[in-house]
Image: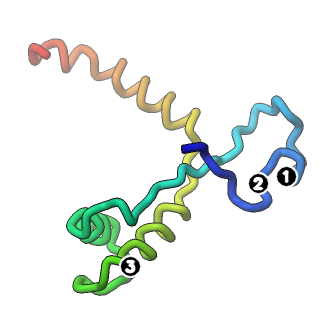
């Protein structure tokens, strides 16, 4: 699936020049309807969503979609932190025997 941008977050609309060092936040579309209701209930529980435990699948899909779309992730920073963590913990992992 192609990533989508939030309304008004294009480079032209934000005043950023193409090729700017600032990364634009992109949202990945995720079809919550395709998920099992148990997965949606675990998502609700893990992120403490404000929806009843015995809600219908449609209510859980709506709540999970809203929650997921509100997260803004800087992909470059996330990848950099991941690589740093892997690199800095490399000695610990190799000493365990993995």
* Residue 14 in picture, x, y percent from top left: 85, 52
* Nearest to N terminus: mark 2 or mark 3: 2
**Marks 1 and 2: CB-CB under 8 Å?**
yes
Name the residue tied to disc 2.
9
**Residue 3 spot, x, y in % from top left:** 60, 45
| Left or right: 94 in relation to 49 | left
Please say if the residues under marks 2 and 3 sit with CB atoms less than 8 Å apart.
no
Which residue is at a point 53% across and 58% down the rendered structure image?
A: 71
- The residue drawn where x is 14% and y is 16% is 98
Secondary-structure class at tag 1: helix
From the top left corner, tell me how far across and down residue 88 is, in percent.
Answer: 34, 21
Label located before the other in sequence (3 or 1):
1
SS at mark 3 in the image? helix
Residue 9 relative to residue 32: left or right: right
Q: Is residue 93 above or below residue 57?
A: above
Left or right placement of residue 47 versus residue 2 in this view: left
Disc 2, SS: loop
Residue at the spot of label 3: 58
Picture layout, residue 72 above or below residue 2 = below
Q: Which residue is mark 1?
A: 14
């Amino acid at each position: 699936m192609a990533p989508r941008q939030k309304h008004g977050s294009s480079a032209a609309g934000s005043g950023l020049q193409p090729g700017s060092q600032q990364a634009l936040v992109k949202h990945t579309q995720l079809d919550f309807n395709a998920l099992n209701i148990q997965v949606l209930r675990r998502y609700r529980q893990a992120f403490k969503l404000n929806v009843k435990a015995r809600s219908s699948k449609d209510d859980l899909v709506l709540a999970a979609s809203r929650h997921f779309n509100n997260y803004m992730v800087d992909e470059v920073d996330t990848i950099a932190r991941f690589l740093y963590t892997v690199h800095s913990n490399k000695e610990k992992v190799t000493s365990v025997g993995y």
